[in-house]
Amino acid sequence: MTDKRFDTIIIGAGHNGLVCAAYLAKAGRKVLVLEAASQPGGAAATREFHPGFRVSSGAHLLTQLNPGVAKDLGLASHGLDYAARDLKTVALAEDGAHLVIDGGSVSGVSGNDAVAYAKFHSQNRRFGKVLDGFFSRRQPTLVDRSWDDAFSLLKLGWSLKRLGKEDMQDLMRVGLINIYDVANEHFDSELLKAAVAMDGVLGSHMGPRSPNTVYGYLHRHIADAWGNSGPALVRGGMGAVGQAFAEAARGFGAEIRCDSKVARVEMQGCHATGVTLESGETLFADTIVSNADPKTTFEKLVGYPNLDAGFSRRVHNFRSRGVSAKLHLALDTLPDFRGLDAALAGQRLLLAPTMDHIERAFNHAKYGEYSRAPVMEISIPSVHDDSLTPAGKHVLSAIVQFAPYALREGWDSGKEVFKRIALEQLERYAPGINNRVLASELSTPVDLEREFGMAGGHWHHGEIALDQALLMRPMPGAHQYRTPIPGLYLCGAGSHPGGGIMGLAGRNAAEAVIKHRKDREERAA
Ligand SMILES: Cc1cc2nc3c(=O)[nH]c(=O)nc-3n(C[C@H](O)[C@H](O)[C@H](O)COP(=O)(O)OP(=O)(O)OC[C@H]3O[C@@H](n4cnc5c(N)ncnc54)[C@H](O)[C@@H]3O)c2cc1C
């Protein structure tokens, strides 16, 4: 008979659930991770979508993996291997006059823009260092403060002061405006402005003129502060990252059970005491940690009857409407992007000509329509990794925006039309690409919700707007990884500091669980 009592049960084996499991197991806890899908990793996944063609079916570029987490968990020794690192970003132009961003330098623009970009990049790295101090630990709270919170706030104040007066003023100012205005202030090239704006809106229900897009940009560029100069491609696709996290967690003693969907959190009085699976099996633990997004956790697994009205309203109002679709193409040969040196085909390619174009593409999403001329982030990983396709063939993966979760006409009829629009858009930049397509697949936010169990198919499990970020993430009453239900914690992208394959939410949550337990034991002694 299996022992059904654990110190901690983690709902979900997304990378954050696995990171949390690893740190807790390392600290000596008996940890069980329950995953609905048949493999661990969450949206860090590789899937065969056409015979012989495999693709990263959720996240596709490793942009923000925290080096401290990777080191603590020994991910390299658990099979994490890069096919390419420090990718350049190529902002594609329809006429072939592309520009190339390589870390802090950019080519294909005027001398003034090149100098302005270098300055912009180095200032953002300094801002990133401030954010890093904030991302790498439990966020403080302004009420019910502890010594720990006071220390975090002091540290934040000190790192802001160290920025110097000019940077500090700039950070306060840009945080309150939008990426559209910021890019206009710095650059002349429309293509460069659009490339910068894309980093502010990818994965978010926002256009360049929306508030919070500068925060979105800084969030995405946090890894610049860790010394990265561009995203990486993982050999075997992102599923290999999920597997490496899972091996690390197992290595510290955590048990992972796949095909084990949790139906509800069990309560005794107001305390979380266990979970019941869809199979009907009930398992018990002192601590339950949810890697599922906040909406799923509170609406479905806990249930509104177990929450007070005010908190239930916050959960209900939490914004998690995804706008990113995923396009996968099996290609007979490498596509020819007009004017693009073949040596650059394996880099990160952006298809977004101007900021106004992005804004117009976003406008449709506000009204429940898909963009008629969508913008894209494209990767052709098979250029660097021949394990993904048959010899000589290629696979293209693109994030296509904007595709609103709640499409007015419904995705049943909208999906094929939107896929055709995306293919037509690609054809403008890579003439003949459609003749090379052996198979294609589009995953809408509704499909992504189904495949990865993330509410709304949202990149971050919920917008990272300022009212849902930092001190407020995901919502008052459930910040600092604790929830109104004693014994229930959050550890996923919906908690601080948000999404991306980063690992910090999982690590911070584990630290919060350990600290809370220690405080309780000290109080009881
Ligand atoms: C289209 C798209 C493209 C993206 N591209 C990138 C990218 O290129 N780079 C990047 O860094 N990030 C990208 N992201 C974001 C990134 O994938 C997420 O932020 C990240 O996966 C969040 O990790 P997580 O561990 O918190 O949650 P998830 O990866 O969502 O994992 C949560 C896990 O919980 C499980 N679960 C949920 N409910 C239950 C239940 N009831 N019982 C058991 N298990 C359950 C799910 O099955 C899942 O495995 C992208 C996201 C999307 C949607």
Image (cartoon, rainbow, N blue to C red):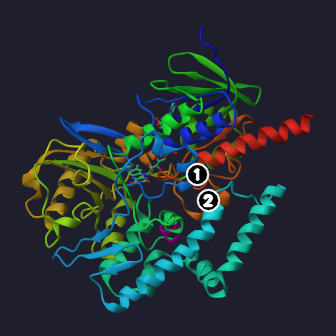
Q: Crowdedness of circle 1 by 10 Å Cα count: few (<14), some, many (20+)? A: many
Q: Is 81 included in the stretch rendered in magenta?
A: no
Quarter occupied by the N terminus: top right
Residue 299, how many percent across, how many down?
58, 37
Counting residues from the start of the chain, the first of labels 1 and 2 encountered is 2
Magenta region: 212-218
Q: Secondary structure at mark 2?
A: helix
Q: Relative to residue 522, is residue 35 drawn left or right?
A: left
Ligand 1 neighbours mark 1 (CB distance < 8 Å): no
The residue under the point 45% across, 24% down is 259
Q: Amino acid at mark 1?
A: Leu
235 versus 136 height, above or below: above
Which amino acid type is marked by label 2?
A: Phe
Residue closest to the far right: 525
Q: At which x and y percent is residue 506?
A: 59, 45
Predominant secondary structure, magenta span: helix
For residue 139, side relative to residue 204 (left or right): right
Q: Position of residue 382 (x, y in %)?
A: 23, 50
Q: Secondary structure at mark 1?
A: helix
> Which residue position holds label 1?
504
Cβ–Cβ under 8 Å for marks 1 and 2: yes
- Mark 1 to mark 2 CA distance (whole Å): 7 Å
Q: Tell me the quarter of the image containing the C terminus.
A: top right
Residue 262 appears at what percent x and percent y?
A: 54, 27
Visible residue check, residue 205: yes
User: Seen from this angle, which residue lies furthest bottom?
Assistant: 112
Name above or below for residue 430 compared with residue 525.
Answer: below
The label number, if any, that marks residue 135 in the structure image: 2
Q: Nearer the viewer, residue 503 or 81?
A: 81
Q: Is residue 30 above or below residue 186?
A: above
